[in-house]
Image: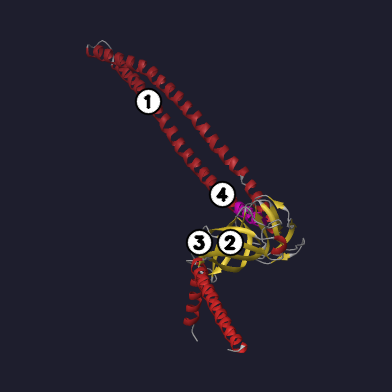
Amino acid sequence: MTDFARSFRQLQAQERKGAVWLLGGAVFLLVAWLVWAGAARVSLFEESADARVELDGATFPVEAPFLGRIVLTNLRVGREVRRDEVLVELDSMPQQLELKETQVRITGLEAPLTKLRAQIQAEENLRAAEEQGSVSSAREAASRVNEARIPAQFAEQDLERIKSLYAQRLVSARELQKAQSDSDRMRVAVHTLQAAAGHVPQDQAARNREREVRIARLQGEIATLEGQRAALQADAARLDYEIDRRRIRAPADGRIGEAVVLQVGAVVPDGARLGSIVPVGRLLVVAHYPAQAAFGRIRAGQRATLRLAGFPWAEFGTVSATVTRVAQEVRDGKVRVELALAAGSSFRGTLAHGMPGTLEVAVERVSPMGLTLRTAGQWLTRPL
């Protein structure tokens, strides 16, 4: 065997040994990759570029209720305001003039009302005085009747005595006629006094009826004037409400987040947005996702990361958050997702309401093998 043959066989043996090692290494790598692909876990994220930092509470808009000319404005971005503080006032001079006229008319009704009430009170007082006088008159008339009965009874007795004497022929017929005349006169006097005593309460009752008619008429006039006053007071309340509506007030405590540049004398259209009030509260993260990305995938308790626009994450870090609430209804094709800020965020800056960014929510953890098979299945079932 020559040296060349031996060298050639040695080279072939080395080549076979290298191929075995290469094949063994490939098999090992394949087995290792399969083990990793089946056992390892990777996170899947749902990303939304429609995310921002908001306050836990809706921003309150400041709008013009109707067309008007500005006479006062306190809208300045960043200024702290209190609830019901006047921010903008629109011209209300026509309503104020009408309100003053109405108030003058209301005041003008007080004098006749006072006069009518005084007349009623005077009628009541006069009726009480007349009734008291009527009682006294009735007692006096009764006394006169009693006084008249005494001589009438005496005349009746004297007539009976004269009749007895006349029957005995002891007195003349003239004396009998005189006694009869005196008795009749006394009896008529008693009847007259009795009739007069009976007229006292009747006259008082008639006067009371007349007075009640007058009082009822006065009360009717008072009711008419009070009705007019009530209508004017309702008009005054309406005008006062219209004037107050032209004072645009802060709907809540907070800070003016945005404001239109307004000048006194400018005219604002009906429903114009003049600014907004950012209420005091804690910050949270709000993002909007397509329905297919949110329903069944994003749930409360999932971790998320917010990268703020304008703040490179390599320099400023990111904001950590946790999903707290997922809306159950779709609005404008998107689903609202709310997240609470988590402790330990790496963001090096100050968070403020309205800061936009991109949000990533870790929705699930799957194996690389499962992810590969899922991707392949989606690719195969994708319509051509």
Where disc 2 sits, the SS reads: strand
Which residue bears the numbered disc 1? Answer: 194
Magenta residues, as a range?
Answer: 235-250
Label 4: how many residues lie within 10 Å, few (<14), some (14-19) or many (20+)? few
Categorize mark 1 by other alpha carbons within 10 Å: few (<14), some (14-19), many (20+): some
Instruction: Indicate which disc, 1 or 4, sits on the residue closer to the N terminus.
Output: 1
> Residue at (38%, 26%) from the top-left corner?
192
Q: Amino acid at mark 4?
A: Ala
**Gap between marks 1 and 2 measured at Cα:** 112 Å
Amino acid at pointer 1: Gln
Q: Which residue is mark 3?
A: 299
- If the image is split into quadrants, where does the N terminus sit? bottom right
Residue 186, percent from left and from top = 36, 20
Q: Are marks 2 and 4 in contact (CB under 8 Å)?
A: no
Q: Is residue 209 magenta?
A: no
Q: Nearer the viewer, mark 3 or mark 4?
A: 3
Identify the residue under disc 2: 304
Of 18 and 42, which appears nearest the observer? 18
| Tag 2–tag 3 contact (CB < 8 Å) | no
Q: Earlier in the sequence, mark 3 or mark 1?
A: 1
Question: Residue 280: x percent and y percent?
Answer: 65, 51
Q: Secondary structure at mark 3?
A: loop
Which residue carries the number 4 mark? 230
Q: Position of residue 244 (x, y in %)?
A: 65, 54
SS class, disc 1: helix
Magenta stretch, main secondary structure, is helix
- Image side of residue 33 versus residue 265, left or right: left
